[in-house]
Image (spheres, rainbow, N blue to C red):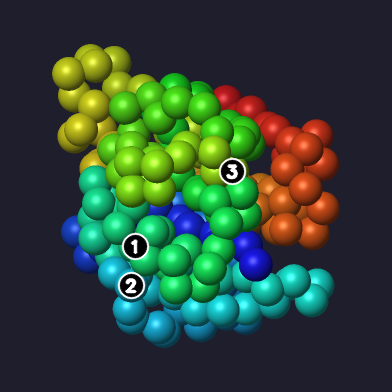
């Protein structure tokens, strides 16, 4: 069973912000796989589904980014999941806008959602679908930057980026992360 988690912040205020691109990709996956994210427990909106006969659980933590690990830990514990079958979809300041990169494990680069998950699980050895959101010119503006909506130019290519990330997550489930890396590492700009 794969647990696929999109990171973001709940609520209308954050809906179309850079920090919520993980939620956007998860909603795309849910629509593509006909999974209704109607379950409200484990501090998340979630539901089960299947892709090519493989069981998946899609989840969006509702604890705000900094406490995402609470929901992930509860879901993995309840479904007796393995950290090696956890896929986390998240924004990444260290990648240029539009880049989609995949990896397993590694550091958290100050991303508070990833820090929370790694801390709660006692391991950072999960798969990641990283979505480049670029960096602000002034590094002291980082927190405000990630909570801003995308600009017009960014919005124009956002559907393509979301689709590419959703396809990459699907490929991980259907094949493996190495195959997905070869097919979906992209860079826009």
Residue, x 30% and y 58% (percent of image)?
70
Which residue ends up furthest to the top in the rendered image?
Answer: 138
Residue 75, visible in the rendered structure: yes
SS for dot 3: strand
* Residue 49, percent from left and from top: 62, 78
Residue, x 76% and y 53% (percent of image)?
171
Residue, x 24% and y 27% (percent of image)?
142
Give the number of the disc on residue 71. Answer: 1
Residue, x 33% and y 48% (percent of image)?
120
State how far apart marks 1 and 2 are (Cα).
5 Å
Q: Residues within 10 Å of mark 2 (few under 14, many from 20)?
A: some
Q: Quadrant of the N terminus?
A: bottom right
* Residue 182, percent from left and from top: 80, 34
Is residue 18 positioned above or below 175 on the image?
Answer: above
Q: Is residue 126 left or right of residue 1?
A: left
* Residue 45, percent from left and from top: 38, 74
Residue located beneath label 3 in the image: 127
Which is nearer the N-term, disc 1 or disc 2?
A: 2
SS for dot 1: helix
Residue located beneath label 2 in the image: 42
Is residue 130 positioned above or below 13 on the image?
Answer: above
């Amino acid at each position: 069973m794969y647990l696929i988690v999109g990171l973001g912040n709940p609520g209308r205020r954050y809906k179309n912000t850079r920090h919520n691109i993980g939620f956007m990709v998860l909603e795309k996956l849910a629509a593509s796989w006909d999974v209704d994210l109607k379950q409200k427990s484990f501090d998340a909106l979630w539901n089960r589904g299947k892709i090519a006969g493989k069981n998946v659980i899609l989840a969006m933590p509702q604890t705000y980014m900094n406490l995402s690990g609470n929901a992930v830990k509860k879901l993995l514990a309840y479904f007796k999941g393995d950290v090696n079958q956890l896929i986390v979809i998240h924004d990444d300041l260290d990648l240029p806008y539009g880049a989609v990169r995949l990896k397993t494990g590694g550091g958290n680069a100050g991303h508070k959602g990833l820090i929370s998950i790694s801390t709660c699980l006692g391991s950072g050895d999960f798969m990641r679908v990283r979505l480049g959101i670029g960096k602000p010119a002034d590094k002291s503006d980082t927190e405000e930057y990630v909570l801003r909506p995308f600009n017009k130019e960014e919005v124009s290519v956002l559907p393509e980026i979301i689709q590419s990330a959703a396809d990459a997550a699907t490929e991980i489930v259907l094949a493996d992360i190495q195959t997905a890396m070869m097919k979906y590492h992209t860079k826009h700009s």
